[in-house]
C-alpha cells in the first residue's frame, strides 16, 4: 500500500459531497473505474474505486501553522503562500486504503484530491503530506488534469529544496521520493549553481520513477562520458529517516555510468 496523505484547505467550512466528488472523478477521468459511494458515517464520506477505499474526513480546524510555515516560506508554486494559507479555517483529510503500489497510490490520491478541489467552492489549496508541499487549487487541478496523463507530476509530488552554500557551491535534497517507493536524493557542496543542481535532482528523480531502482550503491551518473558523479547510499545529512542516495562530485570509480542506459 502507498503512503502519504493530502489535506485540502478551506476558507470556510470543510464541507464536500461524496456524490459531487464521485461525479467530478467520472467526468475528469472517464477511464477510471466508476466510484461506488458508501453511506457517510460521522460526517466522513467514503467510496470505493475498484479495490481501493477512499475516505474524506472533515477537520473543523486549520492545519497547524507549525506544519505549514516552512512549506509556505519555500513554495515555488504558490505566490503569497503564507498570507493566503494563514486564512484557511478548516481542512479535509483525504486518505486511501488498498493494495496499490506507491505510484498507483499517488496517482489515485492526486485524482481524488483534484476532484475534491473542483467540487468545493471554498477550497483554496492542498498540503501534500508526502512532500510537505503547499499547492494552490488552480495549479493542483491543472497538474492533475494535464501533467498526470503524461507521467509523474514531479512538481506536486516531490519537493526539490536547493540553495547556495557559498559563491561557488550549492546543496540540496528531495522530500517526497520515499512516498513514491524510492530513497530521497541529496547533494552537499556541489560545484553546480542551485538551478543546475535542481535540474539534476529533478532529472534523476524522473529517471528513477520511470525505470525503477536501477541505480545501485557506487554507480556513477553523468550527462556525458566525461562527467562522473558517484551515487552513495548513506545516512541523511538533512534529517531524513533511513538511507538516502547522496551525490558525490569528484573522482569516481570506473563503473559503467547509468547515463548509458537512457
Image (cartoon, rainbow, N blue to C red):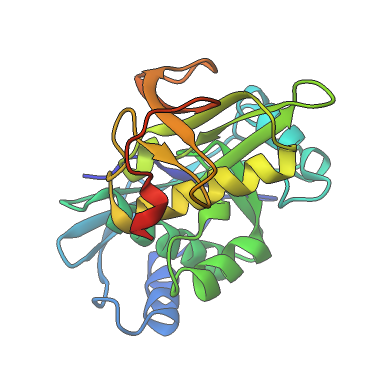
Report the front residue among 254 and 199. Answer: 254
Is residue 77 something that shows in the picture?
yes
In the displayed structure, 78 sits above or below 17; it is above
In the rendered image, which quarter contains the C terminus?
Answer: bottom left
Q: How many marks?
A: 0
User: Image quadrant of residue 38?
Assistant: bottom left
Provide residue 30's location: percent of width, then percent of height.
Answer: 35, 84
For the point 59% across and 61% down, the residue is 140
Provide residue 36's location: percent of width, then percent of height.
Answer: 23, 71
Provide residue 33's location: percent of width, then percent of height.
Answer: 23, 76
Report the front residue among 157 and 249. Answer: 249
In the displayed structure, 101 sits above or below 50; it is above
In the shown orientation, is residue 12 left or right of residue 105?
right
For the point 34% across and 39% down, the residue is 182
Is residue 43 something that shows in the picture?
no
For the point 55% across and 36% down, the residue is 132
In the displayed structure, 231 sits above or below 91; it is above
Report the front residue among 224 and 55. Answer: 224
In the shown orientation, is residue 8 left or right of residue 150?
right
For the point 62% across and 30% down, the residue is 172
Report the front residue among 125 and 192. Answer: 192
In the displayed structure, 38 sits above or below 66; it is below
User: Image quadrant of residue 85?
Assistant: top right
In the shown orientation, is residue 69 left or right of residue 257?
right
Amino acid at each position: 500500500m502507498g503512503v502519504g496523505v493530502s489535506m485540502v484547505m478551506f476558507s470556510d467550512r470543510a464541507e464536500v459531497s461524496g456524490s459531487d466528488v464521485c461525479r467530478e472523478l467520472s467526468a475528469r477521468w472517464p477511464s477510471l473505474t466508476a466510484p461506488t459511494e458508501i453511506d457517510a458515517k460521522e460526517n466522513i464520506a467514503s467510496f470505493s474505486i475498484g479495490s481501493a477505499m477512499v475516505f474524506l474526513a472533515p477537520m473543523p480546524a486549520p492545519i497547524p501553522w507549525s506544519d505549514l510555515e516552512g512549506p509556505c516560506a519555500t513554495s515555488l508554486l504558490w505566490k503569497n503562500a503564507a498570507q493566503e494559507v494563514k486564512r484557511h479555517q478548516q481542512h479535509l483529510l483525504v486518505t486511501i486504503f488498498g493494495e496499490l503500489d506507491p505510484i498507483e497510490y499517488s496517482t489515485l490520491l492526486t485524482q481524488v484530491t483534484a476532484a475534491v478541489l473542483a467540487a468545493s467552492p471554498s477550497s483554496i489549496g492542498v498540503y501534500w503530506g508526502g512532500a510537505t508541499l503547499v499547492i494552490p487549487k488552480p495549479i493542483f487541478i491543472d497538474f492533475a488534469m494535464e501533467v498526470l496523463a503524461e507521467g509523474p507530476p514531479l512538481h506536486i509530488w516531490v519537493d526539490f529544496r536547493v540553495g547556495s552554500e557559498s559563491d561557488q557551491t550549492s546543496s540540496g535534497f528531495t522530500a517526497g521520493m520515499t512516498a513514491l517507493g524510492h530513497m530521497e536524493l541529496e547533494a552537499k557542496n556541489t560545484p553546480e549553481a542551485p538551478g543546475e543542481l535542481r535540474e539534476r535532482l529533478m532529472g534523476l528523480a524522473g529517471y528513477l520513477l520511470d525505470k525503477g531502482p536501477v541505480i545501485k550503491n557506487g554507480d556513477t551518473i553523468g550527462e556525458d562520458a566525461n562527467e562522473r558523479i558517484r551515487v552513495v547510499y548513506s545516512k541523511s545529512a538533512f534529517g531524513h529517516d533511513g538511507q538516502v542516495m547522496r551525490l558525490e562530485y569528484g573522482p569516481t570509480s570506473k563503473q559503467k555510468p547509468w547515463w548509458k542506459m537512457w
